[in-house]
Structure formats: structure tokens, C-alpha cells
Image (cartoon, grey):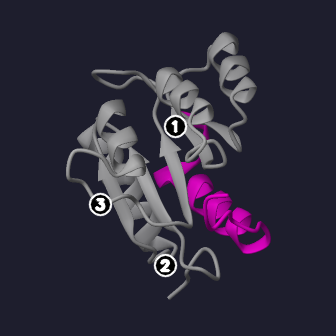
Amino acid sequence: MINIAAEAATILLVEDNDVDRESVRRAFQRHRIENQVVEVVDGVEALDVMRGVAGIEALQRPYLVLLDLALPRIDGHTVLREMRADPLLRDSIVFVLTTSKDAGDVKACYEQQVAGYLVKGEVGSGLKGLAELIQSYANVVRFPNGHH
């Protein structure tokens, strides 16, 4: 069993596509990433889980967010802006995982301090590159644990 961080970080997967969610699950299984994965299907639900609102228990730190941009209700760009404006969420580690190769999307996401921008079709067969990146990243990077 490999926990991607010493503190056993939870992974929040924000993805509305069933096939893409299953692909991420399988990639993590193949690479023995056994951290808890919390799955949500839209931007509103993602913010609610991170904030712990509407009777939902807040996602415990440390965590890492895998965020799609094309989401129902509110899109990934809006989620990022809201996270960075929220004192409780602004230090969250976010990787964008999307189909968009648009230079404007890439620029806008990095302006919101994402840790990385990954295009689904470019991360290798079965999302191998995603699993390897997350594993390597978390083995050398310290995660923010609490709120200041």
C-alpha cells in the first residue's frame, strides 16, 4: 500500500463524467495509491464538501483536489476563483484534469495558483502519468494541514 503523503492525504476528485472517474480509480488501483478518494460530480458539491456546509462534514486535511473544468452548475474556473477567495480554502492543492488544451484555460488556471494543469488525453494510457505525477508530487511536497 502506498499512501501518497505521510499524512495520508485524501484526494477530492471533481469530475462529472462516469468514465473519467472510473479511469482515475483504475489508475490509482494499478499504482497502488490507496488513499481515500472522495468523488463529487459538480462544482457546487466540491465547494460544499471542502467547506462542510449544508450538513456535510468538511473534508479533512490534508487533501489534494483533482478538478475538471467542464462541470455542471458551476465550472472549474469558478470553483478555483471561489477557493482562492475563501480564507479556509485558498491554500488547497489543486491539479486541473481536463480535456481543454485552450491556452486561455491554462493561463487562467495558473493565475489561480494550480499545482498543475493536465490534459486527459496527454497523461498516458490509462491515466498512468496522472497516477505517477500524484505519487511523485506527494512524496516530496509538504501539505498544508490546518487553517491559520
Front residue of 79/90: it is 90
Q: CA distance from mark 2 to mark 1?
A: 20 Å
Residue sitting at the far right: 140
Residue sitting at the far left: 55
Residue 120 image label: 1
Res. 122 image quadrant: top right
Residue 134 sits inside the magenta stretch: yes
Residue sitting at the far front: 148
Residue 57 image label: 3
Front residue of 61/104: it is 61
Would you name the residue on which mark 2 appears?
A: 32
Horizontal side, residue 24 vs residue 66: left or right: left
* Point 66% across, 26% down: residue: 109
Work out whether residue 119 can be spotted: no
* Point 38% across, 64% down: residue: 37
Mark 3 residue crowding within 10 angstroms, few (<14) / some (14–19) / many (20+): few
Q: Helix, strand, or loop for circle 1? A: helix
> Identity of the amino acid at label 2?
Arg
Q: What secondary structure prevails in the magenta region?
A: helix
Q: Helix, strand, or loop for circle 2? A: loop
Horizontal side, residue 29 vs residue 16: left or right: right
Question: Mark 3 against mark 1, which lies toward the viewer?
Answer: 3
12 to 17, vertically: above or below: below
Q: CA distance from mark 3 to mark 1?
A: 30 Å
Give the mark nearer the N terminus: 3 vs 2: 2
Q: Which residues are magenta?
A: 119-148
